[in-house]
Image (spheres, rainbow, N blue to C red):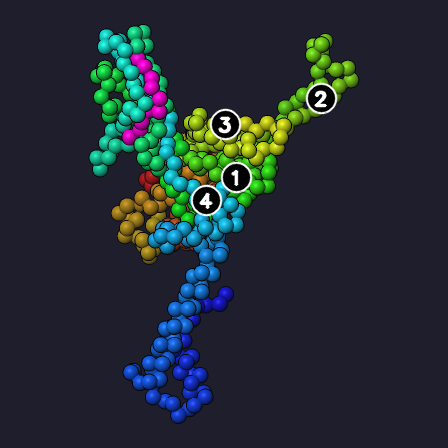
Amino acid sequence: MAEIISRQQFYDMFITELQSVQATLTDTSEGSVIDIMAGVTAQLLSTVSLLAADEFSKTFFDSAHGPEVTGGADDLQTLAVDHFGDAFARPAASKSGGTVTFSRAAATAGLCTIAAGTVVETAANASGVKTRFVTLADVELDIGILTINATVAAETAGAAGNVLAAKIVTIGTTLTDSSVVVTNAAAMSGGEDAELDATYRGTIRSLLQSLKGATLSALQAKALTVPGVTTATAIENQIVAIEYDIGTSLPVVGADYFRIPYAKIYIADVNGAASSTLVDDTQDAIDLVRAAGVLVEVLAAIAQEVDWTAAITLNPAGPNFAALSANPAPIESTMSDYIQDLGIGTDFVRSTAAAAILAVWGPAGTNDITTFTHATPVGDVDAAANEKLIPGTVEIV
């Protein structure tokens, strides 16, 4: 691959070419006429060369960038939209959502209307920040009604709104009944930050894959384009059927059994599961690309925590020996990422997992670890077709 020529290289090329034509022109001292001419020419050619390279890079998906690199223009999105249309625009940040439950011990305060826009919040984190949600429709607690569910959406878009179950504990809007309390039985899901370049490139690839139609890989790729879906696995099942005579309530005489294929797509958000809203949004997306007359069912995965602890031996000559001796958190983060990246229905295999960690931190990687020994789990962890393994307690012991 050709390299970009530097300003100094252009300068040297100018001097060499000039002296090859007229050997008597030897005064290249700083400030001389030749030095000034060579410098101006080199600067001009260097600027043009860099500009050409920059513009050329915008024509390839692997080298075009968005605001995180350019500081302004979204060249990657422009390239994608120009080639494939508006459906390939960079996904914006999305809001998480779910269901909260308002309840009270008694109805002594009478009717209590919880209006759309009522704010509910998590407890403040270490920085004093609360995650806020708003109700989307009016609900009422009345005589004989001590509990009512309400659909909520995060006030601010982003992954920070994907809070776990039982984390929404405060009502931020004054109600007519101060005894009303709130909680969320299930996690909020569907929140995503605006995609950075690396993720957006993956989305573009998934969208291209989904153009294939109703293949399993295409359906799976389409599911991954739905905001909030971080993992999707498509599988094909078969239903055994036989031609049936409704009038006689018996199989048709001479009929043979046959199999009808249908697909299931299990999806999960960052928490390893999916809300009913996220399932519905994904089903809508899948219905746009599935083959006519073919059943494709979208289902939420079930999160299964995996506790992963291990002992390590650090290499004293490793580049991060001092830092990792004091705090092995970077290795623990790699372990958590490994589990998080496992697909739905994918088992945790101890030997494979250990090899993945050593590939990053072992001799073939940073050379910070010489040995990696499992403590837990004591054996491989099997995942059912609908289970998504997620990190539980992950630490170096």
Nearer-the-camera pick, 150 or 328: 150
* Quadrant in which the C terminus is drawn: top left
Instruction: Give the mark nearest the N terminus, 3 or 2.
Output: 2
Q: Main secondary structure of the magenta part?
A: strand
**Which residue matches tag 4?**
89
Report whether 346 appears left or right of 336: right
Outermost residue, bottom side: 24
Which disc, if any, is residue 257?
2
The percent position of residue 297, horizontal first and vertical second, equals: 54, 27
Label 3, label 4: how far apart the Cα atoms are: 27 Å
Report whether 84 appears left or right of 314: right
Q: Looking at the rendering, which quadrant does residue 276 occupy?
A: top left
How many residues crowd around disc 2 within 10 Å: few (fewer than 14), some, or many (20 or more)?
few
The percent position of residue 57, horizontal first and vertical second, equals: 46, 59
**Residue type, label 2:** Tyr
**Residue type, label 4:** Ala
**Which residue matches tag 1?**
221
The percent position of residue 258, horizontal first and vertical second, equals: 70, 24
How many residues crowd around disc 4 within 10 Å: few (fewer than 14), some, or many (20 or more)?
some
Task: Identify whether 78 is placed above or below 206.
Answer: below
Residue at disc 3, secondary structure: strand
Residue at disc 4, secondary structure: loop
Q: How many marks?
A: 4
Instruction: Give the mark nearest the N terminus, 3 or 1.
Output: 1
Magenta range is 132-141
| Mark whose residue sits in front, 1 or 2 | 1
Q: Looking at the rendering, which quadrant does residue 161 occupy?
A: top left
| Mark whose residue sits in front, 4 or 1 | 4
* Residue in view at x 29 percent, y 82 percent: 30
**Which residue matches tag 3?**
299
Marks 4 and 2: in contact by CB < 8 Å? no
| Mark whose residue sits in front, 2 or 4 | 4
